[in-house]
Amino acid sequence: MRLNVVRRVRRPGCLLFWRSHATATATTNTSTTTTTRQTAYILPMFPYPSGSLHMGHVRVYTISDVLARFHRLAGRKVIHPIGWDAFGLPAENAALERNLDPADWTNSNILEMRRQLQSIGADFDWHREIRTNDPAYYKWTQLLFLRLMRAGLVERREAFVNWDPVDKTVLANEQITQDGRAERSGAKVELLRLSQWFIKTTHYAKELLDDLKHLDWPESVKQQQANWIVSLDVKPLPFLADSSIVAGVFTGFWAHNPALGDARLPVFVTSDMIHDPHGHAEHDADIEPNDTQLLHRHAGEFGQVGNDQPSVLQLKVAEWQACGLVRPHDKYKLRDWLVSRQRSWGTPIPIVYCESCGIVPLPEEQLPMLHLPWKAPKSTVHDAECACPKCSRPARRETDTMDTFVDSSWYWLRYLDPANTSELASRDSTQALPVDIYVGGVEHAIMHLLYARFMGKFLTDEGIVSLPHGEPFKRLLAQGMVVGKTYKCPDTGQYLKRDDLDLTDPSVPLVKATGKTPAVTVEKMSKSKHNGVNPMTVLEKHGADAVRLYILYRAAPADLLAWDESALIGMERFLTRVRSLASSATPPPSSDSQTPAQLDQSIAKAMHEAVHEVTTAMTTTFAFHVGIASLIKLSHVLAEAPDRRSESFRKGVQLLVRLLHPYAPLTSRELWSTLSTAQPAWPTPAEVEFSESTQICVVQLNGRKALVLDDVPSSISTDHDAIKRHVLASQPVKDLLINASTGDARLVRQVFVAKTGRLVNLVI
């Protein structure tokens, strides 16, 4: 029975129905102009077209699709676009390995991943689809580079960079392993000094920090951004130095600190240099043991070296500031953005080098500067020859390309007007900004979000958009990773494939070769760890709706999702129950029928709770698992209904199917067509009015009658904890506990509830 139901969910007719509906939605909603904030802009982070979806993709796009479908049913104009972060080193390397043009490789991957995205039931605005490798897109990326340059926010300078000698490109610190090797190629990273292009993100450092308070983002993400931008410090004190003996890394110089009277402090120099990914050197001391003892001995009021606790110096800042010895200021850790990449597959930097004219920006009317012909490993100087836009003499174009973070820093704007050939986006289309909900992986909490915020502020200052505080994303829904079980050899620690294991009893796995028990952990899905799951295989086996429900029910969006395919059966059973209920519901009464009878109270209560929980999940908490739990509860209540021909049962089933739509759209649409001819809409509280019976509760204060409550729900009469919460939360009791002389609330030390729930004694 269960397997037959799953086949019905996946049958071609149902998918064709959904796809035709999606196409109709796109063709009837092709206008990109938006003049009202009744628009809901739901934006998922666009994927890199690697050629196949992973479960992290399925999770993020299921979440955004659920929200988009809810807002559509609620009557809003929804913008739910998709596109492709199509440039980058992986495609260039794949092209080299296969002797292909990276454009051909990337575009074929996009076709395959588009097909895969459609199979999960996601209803995207495909007419808004963009590709960052499309000249019609990167023309505007180049324009933004030139506008930044015109504003004085782009410059070329020399800097130390992390260089991968195999991939021949610059690496960020995050792309380097702990032993100093490139994460992708495995090559030993070198430090080189190169001429590089920088975007001056530091220009907006203060705004990037201060405006975090305006964002409805997870506090952890905002804190990560703040930590990346700034650290508080004080202006250095004016030290007076004199010479003494030199020993080791101790300079032999001593400083007199006017804030500490005659205290003499030894001066040390750094012996190592650490370079950040933006090309700036930071210093760190490597102090020998003898010198450390010397520094401890002379630290005086500055406290212990390396102590994370507040030092005496920190505690005295206010005192010294009053004396004029120090001046507090913000010391920004944020560095300018190094955007040069020594690779071909990226947005060309629109710059020409001329011996006569120097560095010449390409005129805007000549954009886009197209890619050079693909050659491995990189185009030659001969290919870069061109005419100077100023003097027409022989010149050379820039061969470096831009960091892919530049492409993704503004794509949220282009989605609003993707076919516009005269400007980034029309003024009218930008009225949909800011993005209402931005959905994506928490691993992008710093770099991508920081650069997108920077670009939002620049575009606002340029008058291209009008964003409150220059912030492009109003709310952020940062999803956790999908993790899977990994099995390691107990002797070598090597990751084992499923084929290496005896999983006859999944609770007691064994290594086939040795009969030993492997070490079992839960880690981020990865091919190298052999714990990945092919989404297409899972979707084919269980159906899109069951997979969507499982992903949403298994964990809250921000939490790690531990994949366990065996648990999918629970969602399949739930869908089977819903189908059975829908098949039992009688047709709606004829137009000449009498006024409907009052709804059965148990069904009405479950309906009321479901509407509240699902709506709250969609608008406030994003606790989709709580909303699904309320639907499962409603399905159980309906399954136990004594009369399946009643109006209560029919309305309950109709409501269940409507509330199910964002979560399981294929099943919902198919079942709704059998239940009603009306266009489905999101239910309002008035549709499920529910007045629960109540009982009287006498409230005593220290054993004496104080007041009577008449609104205690009868359903909690035997739940003493629920009664306590209800009584203490009621306004009359809150007023009773106020101390008249001080105005403070008096402490309730104990609460006693009578067996019937009709008497509560508060001891203060």
Image (cartoon, rainbow, N blue to C red):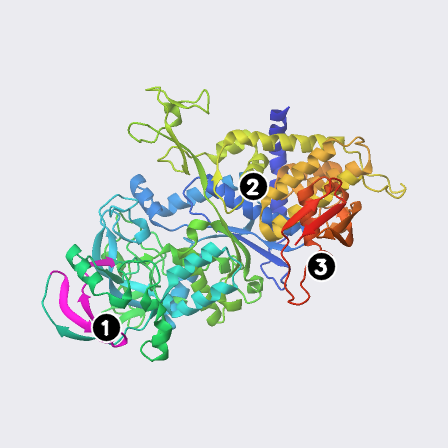
Please name the amino acid that badge 2 sits on: Leu
Residue under the image location 40 percent in, 45 percent down: 106
Please name the amino acid that badge 1 sits on: Ser
Foreground residue among 125 and 618: 618
Is 587 on the left or on the right of 326, as rendered? right
Foreground residue among 111 and 234: 234
The magenta span reads 248-274
Secondary structure type for disc 3 = helix
* Labels 2, 3: front one: 3
Foreground residue among 628 and 408: 628
Reading the image, the residue beneath label 1 is 356
Reading the image, the residue beneath label 2 is 552
Foreground residue among 741 and 513: 741
Secondary structure type for disc 2 = helix
Residue 323, compared with residue 369, is above or below; it is: below
Q: CA distance from mark 1 to mark 2?
A: 62 Å
- Mark 1 and mark 2 lie on one chain; the one further toward the N terminus is 1
